[in-house]
Amino acid sequence: MSGRDQRPPLNRGLGEHRPIPRRDFLQGALVGAASALCGPLLRAHAADMGTGALAAQDQPGYYPPILTGLRGSHPGSFEAAHALRDGRTQGSELDSGESYDLIVVGGGISGLAAAHFFLARHGADARVLILDNHDDFGGHAKRNEFHVGGGLQLANGGTLEIDSPRPYSAVATGLLRELGIDVDAMRRKIENREFYRGLGLRRGSFFDRETFGADRLVVGTGSELTAGTLAHAPLSARARADLVRIEKGSVDYLPGLSSDDKKLRLSKISYRDFLRDLAHVDPQVIAYYQPRTHDEWAVGIDAVSALDCWAFGLPGFRGLGLQGGSIARMGYTPSGYKDTGGSATLHFPDGNATIARLLVRSLVPEAVPGRSAEDIVGARIDYSRLDRPGSKARLRLSSTVIGVTHRGDAASARELAVRYVRGDQIYRARARGCVLACWNMMIPYLVPELPEPQKAALHDLVKSPLVYTSVALRNWQAFSRLGVDHIYAPGSYHSTALLNPKVDVDVYHSPTRPDQPMLLRMVRVPCQPGLSEHEQNKAGRTELLATPFATFERKIRDQLARMLGPGGFDPAVDIEAITVNRWPHGYAPEYNPLWDPEVPPEQRANVLGRAPFGRLTIANSDSGGAAYTDSAIDQADRAVNELLRLYA
Ligand SMILES: Cc1cc2nc3c(=O)[nH]c(=O)nc-3n(C[C@H](O)[C@H](O)[C@H](O)COP(=O)(O)OP(=O)(O)OC[C@H]3O[C@@H](n4cnc5c(N)ncnc54)[C@H](O)[C@@H]3O)c2cc1C
């Protein structure tokens, strides 16, 4: 039976028979039969420099941001790494004959920033090679580009915006400025966060029949829910009263304890346990809040401490009289720009892919037209220029590093060999130093000579899986009729669906009228409540890698039909394209007081794991123990400084 034959029967009512682009269909097709658009990408594994054939990224028309279907960790990006993990790596090895001052493993923001810092600090004559396993650069900072109804529509495939619970460091702020980004000024100029409110649209809650007994969309979420709106929700009278109590009540659920003692207690229980065991709410209320932490932590309320949820602003704590300020057992420190020290926020139309693209412009200016952080949004990058001999920086895609070894003893070696898989070929290149800006838990496979305790610490750094789906819609009239722009759907496959934010910058203009095409952004987090955070992460990763695009598509069409059908939405005609950005290795692991050992911060796994070793140093947001862009930049800065001491 072919892969295609195993697909579930098409549901014509949901529109799965419609010819929207579906990349995983093409994945199964013969390379030579691929469409003109995707041909160069699909040939990624057939062509490479060693055979004299043109590598995929060097072919005319290669432009991965426009690809739809299964993206993020797309088919073809992870197989070589998994083969290494499983001890199945095989193939002949070719010496590329190349020698660099620095090889960077990983072309995410951290790897790109490391290359940028290295070139700036080591000197103009330095030569750097960046290797990444994906068919596009940016790591999590990916761009989804659609051309619907004749216009350009952009979304973030992963990292969404410049923001952090901490202030950006001087280094991270300095890099943004160097790239031309003034966060506060640009935010005022390009973003309109009140756009949908101005149209009278609100947040809504979708109650699904599998979880709550009936499909019902209600205007309002959380504290915006009133007794009036809740009357339409399929909730028991007790659940409605409990929901209002949690959102608006002032009950002290821990009477007799000091603020510090309450915090300590809350740091040892999950938010779910707080609701269930201290606030004694109806189980329907727990079901309502279950995915409330998905966006921030990529895990449900059963796996996040009640204290962190208090700091994050979740409801139910008003009556406890908790005083501001953090304690040691806190993973999330209170945010709020200017009030408590969080960073300013800014969303570009393609999210932080703009930062990645600006970094690539600084590294390979000839590939990226334009001069400013505004005109980059409309710029079309010439991928064929990213990996040219003679450039100070070369960016090589579809290249999975499988080994980094010192030539001789690590303590005294002058050079490293970096082995990577591209297509069916294993290549070897040499460098004076290497920054590993890849996912840290993979490093023990790449560098088996690392000390065992360091490998154990790196293995501990399990990332949280999640999915950002972009759906191109013919129009958004159903949202307008239903009075919502953002739907929280606690029991559904995707727990959030929201219209693309309004951002106007340079040539890019967001839609303004409901009859215009629009992008919808949806978030899915695969969790398994009942397991520890890391076990949930691993189970979710396995689930994501085993889920074909056809299943995502079916779930998306079904969910949108049920949420928006009463507003006239028809999935068979209103969906133009779907991109599922799948991140089995998503958010960097952060300290979680429910599961992590109580050790001083300097003994946490991310710190032990990032120790320099010989001529290699370790960057990536994993090393900072924080799933934020500033962490990726700060860790790049540290890793480059550690390495440069050896070049002195
Ligand atoms: C869905 C999502 C949303 C997010 N939203 C935000 C947000 O709004 N704001 C924010 O500040 N942060 C956000 N983050 C956190 C985000 O991880 C960081 O902001 C930052 O982009 C991480 O950059 P990085 O370079 O450290 O890692 P990555 O972006 O993961 O880059 C590492 C790269 O190394 C590659 N690699 C791994 N192994 C190998 C190998 N063996 N060979 C070659 N290449 C390899 C990886 O495939 C990847 O491309 C989000 C993350 C995700 C997943």
Image: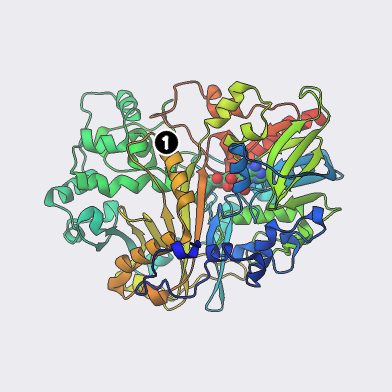
Q: Residue 434: give x, y in percent of width and height.
A: 74, 36
Q: At 73% from the left edge and 56% from the top edge, which residue is drawn?
A: 361
Would residue 70 appear left or right of 60 to someone viewing this image? left
Query: Is residue 368 in view from this perspective?
Result: no
Label 1 belongs to which residue? 535
In this rendering, is residue 330 above or below 345? above
In this rendering, is residue 51 above or below 259? below
Count of labels shown?
A: 1
Image quadrant occupied by the C terminus: top right
Pick out the residue farthest to the front: 1
Q: At 61% from the left edge and 25% from the top edge, which residue is drawn?
A: 454
Cβ of disc 1 within 8 Å of ligand 1? Answer: no
Mark 1 neighbour class, 10 Å CA radius: few under 14, some 14 to 19, many 20 or more = some
Q: Nearer the viewer, residue 125 or 47?
A: 47
Image quarter for residue 111? top right
In this rendering, is residue 260 above or below 372? above
Q: Nearer the viewer, residue 364 or 324?
A: 364
Question: Disc 1 marks which amino acid?
Answer: Glu
Query: Is residue 596 in view from this perspective?
Result: yes
Would residue 322 appear left or right of 325 to someone viewing this image? left
Q: Residue 195: give x, y in percent of width and height.
A: 43, 66
Pick out the residue farthest to the left: 237
Q: Residue 616: give x, y in percent of width and height.
A: 72, 32
Give the structural element (helix, strand or loop) at label 1: helix
Q: At 74% from the left edge and 32% from the top edge, which residue is drawn?
A: 405
Q: Residue 607: give x, y in percent of width and height.
A: 58, 27
Q: How is the image coloured?
A: rainbow
Q: Nearer the viewer, residue 555 or 336?
A: 555
